[in-house]
Image: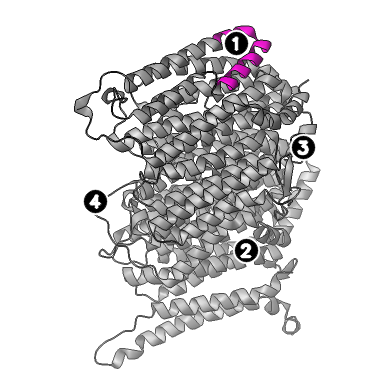
Amino acid sequence: MNNILLFPIITPILGSILIFFLRSQRTVKIVGIITTLFTLFLSIILWILFDNLFIYPQFVIKLTWIPLSNFQPKLGIDGLSLFFIILSTAILPICLMASLQGIKKQIKEFFICFLILESLLILVFSSLDLFLFYLFFEGVLIPMFLIIGVWGSRERKIRAGYYFFLYTLIGSVLMLLGIIWIYFMTGTTDLIILYQLKFTEFEQILLWLAFFSSFAVKVPMIPFHIWLPEAHVESPTAGSLMLAGVLLKLGTYGFLRFSIPLFPIASIYFSPFIYTLSLIGIIYGSLTTLRQVDLKKIIAYSSVAHMGFVTLGIFALNIQSIEGSILLMISHGIVSPALFLLVGILYDRYHSRLLYYYSGLVHIMPLFSVFFVFFTMANISLPGTSSFIGEFLSLLGVYQSNSSVAIIATTGIILGAAYALWLCNRIIFGVLKVRHVNYIGDITMREFVLLFILSLATVLIGIYPNLFFSAMHTSVSYLLTELY
Amino acid sequence: MYLLFNYTNFLYFIAEFYFCTSIIILLIFGVFWYNLSNHINNIYKPILIKNSIWLLVLSMSFYILLLFEHINLQNIFLFDKALELNSYYTFAKIFLFLIAIFVIAASLNYVKNDKINQYEYTVLIACVTLGSVLLINSFNMLSAYLALELQTLAMYVLIAIKRNSEKSLEASIKYLILSAFSSGILLFGLCLIYGITGTLHFDKINNFLSIYFFEFKYNNFFFYNNYELSALLFSNILIIIGFLFKINAAPFHIWAPDVYEGSPTSVTAYLSTASKIGSLFFFIKLIILPFFPIFFNLTVNNNLLLICTILSLILGSFGALYQKKLKRLAAYSTIANIGYILIGLYLIFCSIDSLEGATFYIVVYIITSITFFLILLSLRKNTGANLFKYLADIKALNVMNPFLSLTLALILLSMAGIPPLAGFFAKLYIFLSAITQEKYWLSIIGILTSTVSCFYYLRLIKNMYFEKIDKYSILVKMDREKSLILGLNILLITFFFLNPNIILNLINYCL
């Protein structure tokens, strides 16, 4: 029972090895989906067995077969990382099920890429060691680069792949130098030990900047966000789902896990800086969304705006805002993939993502419109959906810390409503553009089931968020005791 | 009479004796067998090269077996201190011969397709290897120079072995002239050292220099009334420059892209991997044994190595961005990798621990490099006679041969330093030792050039995976030997992180 964390990590790898030897496409798809569902089942077992009142990480496994000097890495789950693991194992079956029709060539390699990606993600979120975290943080780049580049839809995908890879890499190598410096100064990279140590102010500031350069690219914060619209537009539906659902959370998870506990003085020192960048992200992101014509880019920029709220909440450094940000991350991880799924449905039918061609879809796809309006409301953070709880709590926390920032951020909600409602109105309601319609087909049963599950999750979190908060309280409080 | 009973020389030298004998037997075998059928009416001179390649592989394997008992040695001197045997050098020699076996076995298919029908090819490769062995083991400036010349002379002929290709001849002449020039510089440095210290043995030079610096503790470069120190420094710089040429460091790297491109691909594979092992390990020995006091006490020679390191890193990474041919790209990436090794060597003077990082990087880099060249050797269209030359030829390799493109992708990612492949760990060690010695700017330059080099590796991966071409062609079937070697290497590199013990313990033990 002690090694239970090993199973969700090994299952996708075993699944990918099994897929490697299969031939028929149908078997590949079935095996892939069953593997991801089984991994989801295992991670929900992890949630059930999770002890809500335990401060230190649970289900700790020591990886003892790495024989380098003084390097005994551990994997374990904290209150912070539990939900990210569940999120990543939950988004993956949805990704794979959404791409059953859309991917036509090299299906086997597609599934293998995703399964390896899932395994790496679980390893990232559960690693309790700086070096191991960096290893898997970088390792996530390879499958994602292949997914964007091989199965993307247009020629610009190559440039998108490059942007994605090189931006993230350049940010991360500075983090590598920081990690090596920490190892040199303290002799260990084990996180639990490092939480007890204190660095001097000057060291904290430099190291915080090194770690920031890596996480800021992933979040993405302005001005390092340029890879995000490109990567989202060019990647296939499943790739966008994965990217928006989980990979954006890697950056903010890094902030929570490393920047704040290890470098508390520098976090407080730099919080006005982060406020500024987040506010620019929210307002600029929302305003830019208003002028986009590509459906996926609209949702991509709205991701930038939502992540602005998240970082605002994290660096307000009180318990409401951090819990709100984590819940906002989870809800963004449900709502954004749902929106990308909806746009993917449109793309599968009409093969165009331009805004001009769509209008009055309620006449021909009523069920689609229901879900689209619902998720638009979730994007706006309508009370009753999960993003309301997240945004409300983080803004509450930010108000405690700095009220003018909270006021400016709240106007961002209005801008969020602006672009989301405008998008929704433009494509759903209105007069049907008959000359562009060459295919009339509502959403299929498979897509309906996926969207229904996502909407159910949104409403559930919106109505009963204590389900998630109860697991987070201990860890977030422990995080903040370092600061005060 | 006394020498007849002192058989330790010959006892420890038995492996090299065996190898020399096998070279001679190979040569005689070639000569006799080649001319044996002269009197038959239908002149059918047998094409001996395949036989001789297998025979050489066999003799190299026996050499490795003979070397196994030398692993525990510490500092045996042979032949009146002309050669030194050590566990570190034995490790280097075993590694060298392993890589040489890989290259030679891989060139079987190449010589068949490119019709290199001279059996001297094998003999020459054996001579180069012998030269490298003597170079690694040498303890005397003179024996080092002799071994170096043996290595280089055989290399001149090897590069030009394709007689009817003018690119090979041109490459060979370039290599000849530049190498002769640098050997001349080297020789001048040697003469100066001999003139000042009166000896050519490494340990005696070391003694002389340490006593010298112990008595005169100055930190300035120019002495007005002491010619010896300036001459010593001058000769030191000349010798280092002579060897920096050999290992492809900038700013002495200009011959590398042209020679790599012009020579036949299996010879390029040999030149870039096995002959570099010999030169690198000798360079390490050169810095540590004779010239250590100079580097340790004065900072001016450290600056030479530092400038070469930074230039290699920058020129290697940025130079490869504009290349359109595969072999030139390989040459520039070699230069960048030598830059990383030089970071490790530069740090030896701060702490001797970085030798382990440098050795580990050499091992991983040579394995990666040989796999890369093996892949280059196997990219040949079924219809044409030539290997793939241009970067654009490699488009849509994913469709033509998925395993090969996966292998190439993993090799390129390892060279770029992406975790969890082996190249990342090698770079990590180097940067770990750099930051431990507090050389922050050097490590920042190293890491930034690493990301620049990432770009052209990604471009190759992009070409393989993301491009579509109109007409797919069928590649030549890969032969057994190459696939075996490729499989072994790629498994080593990909699954290195599961058990790094294998290589690290070996290096630790041998050091």
Start and end of the magenta stretch? A388-408
Q: Nearer the viewer, mark 2 or mark 1?
A: 1
In whole angstroms, how far apart are the C-alphas of marks 4 and 2?
47 Å
The picture places residue B248, in percent across and down from the top left corner, at 50, 51
Please say which color scheme the image uses.
Answer: one colour
Q: Secondary structure at mark 4?
A: loop
Mark 1–mark 4 CB contact (< 8 Å): no
The residue tagged 4 is: B470
Mark 2–mark 1 CB contact (< 8 Å): no
Q: Nearer the viewer, mark 2 or mark 3?
A: 3
Eyeballing the image, is B506 above or below B395?
A: below
The picture places residue A363, in percent across and down from the top left corner, at 29, 25
The residue tagged 1 is: A406
- The residue under label 4 is which amino acid type? Asp
The residue tagged 3 is: A56
* Residue B184 located within the stretch drawn in magenta: no
Mark 3 Cα shell of 10 Å, populated few (<14), some (14-19), many (≥20): some
In whole angstroms, how far apart are the C-alphas of marks 3 and 4?
58 Å
Quarter in which the C terminus of chain B is drawn: bottom right
Residue B311 visible in the snapshot: no
Q: Residue at x 63, y 7 (%)?
A: A403
Q: The disc numbered 3 marks a residue on which chain? A: A
Q: Which mark is residue B80?
A: none
